[in-house]
Every structure is written in C-alpha cells, then in structure tokens.
Amino acid sequence: DQQRALPVALARHLRGWLAANPTDAVHSHLLAADDVAGRALRGTSGCRFIITNHGDYAQYFKKVRRSKFQVMRRCLNHADAVVLISEE
C-alpha cells in the first residue's frame, strides 16, 4: 500500500541522515511529519522527539478516519515532549 510505504521510506531516509548528522532534537508540527519522525527515532537514543500541535484538534478529528487516531496515539507515545498551542 503506497500510503503506508511512503512514511516508512521517509523514516528510513531520516534515520540514515540522523546517523550521519548527530542531532539533539527533531521537532515536527504536522501529523504526517510526526509519524515519519516518530518512526525514524523509534529505538534510537540521544535525539529528543518534540511535537507541537497547533489549534483545535477536536474539530479536525471529527472529520478523520479512525486510523488517524492510531497514528496520533503512536506519535504521542513516542514523543519526549508535546507542546499544545490553542486559544481554548
């Protein structure tokens, strides 16, 4: 399935880049990027994974498939820190 293959391929590329370029942290802002970064950093040490969520995600999640909830849960479980930015 192409939809699953792309994040895996991007994560593999990012993992290789991080191995060649030691980095203190990876910071992502979008669910797709969170997924790629989380996959790349899974099982590694020395590089923190930080997620920033912007806005009201409750409205967003009312419109998405259940699989997106699973991706978000996986990302949050692997994050070292989560920053929430919202008016509410």
Image (cartoon, rainbow, N blue to C red):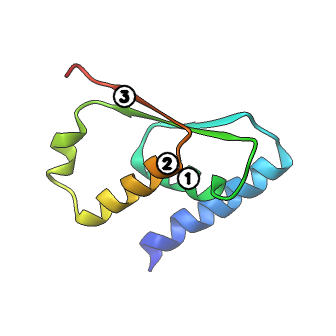
Residue at 27% across, 30% down: 55
Question: Which mark is on residue 13?
Answer: none
In the figure, 51 relative to 66: above or below?
Answer: above
In the figure, 38 relative to 49: above or below?
Answer: below
Amino acid type at image mark 3: Leu
Question: Which mark is on residue 33?
Answer: 2
Contact flag, marks 3 and 1 (Cβ < 8 Å): no
**Residue marked by disc 1:** 38
**Residue marked by disc 3:** 84
Front of the two marks 2 and 1: 1
Could you classify mark 2 by the number of other residues whose Cα lies within 10 Å: few (under 14), some (14-19), or many (20 or more)? some
Front of the two marks 2 and 3: 3
Q: Residue 30 location, x and y as percent?
A: 42, 42
Instruction: Judge from the rendering whether residue 1 lies leftward or rightward of residue 48; answer left or right.
Output: left
Could you classify mark 1 by the number of other residues whose Cα lies within 10 Å: few (under 14), some (14-19), or many (20 or more)? many
Mark before the other along the chain sequence, 2 or 3: 2
In the figure, 71 relative to 84: above or below?
Answer: below
Q: CA gap, disc 2 to disc 1?
A: 8 Å
Looking at the image, which residue sits at the far bottom? Answer: 1
Instruction: Judge from the rendering whether residue 49 lies leftward or rightward of residue 17; answer left or right.
Output: left
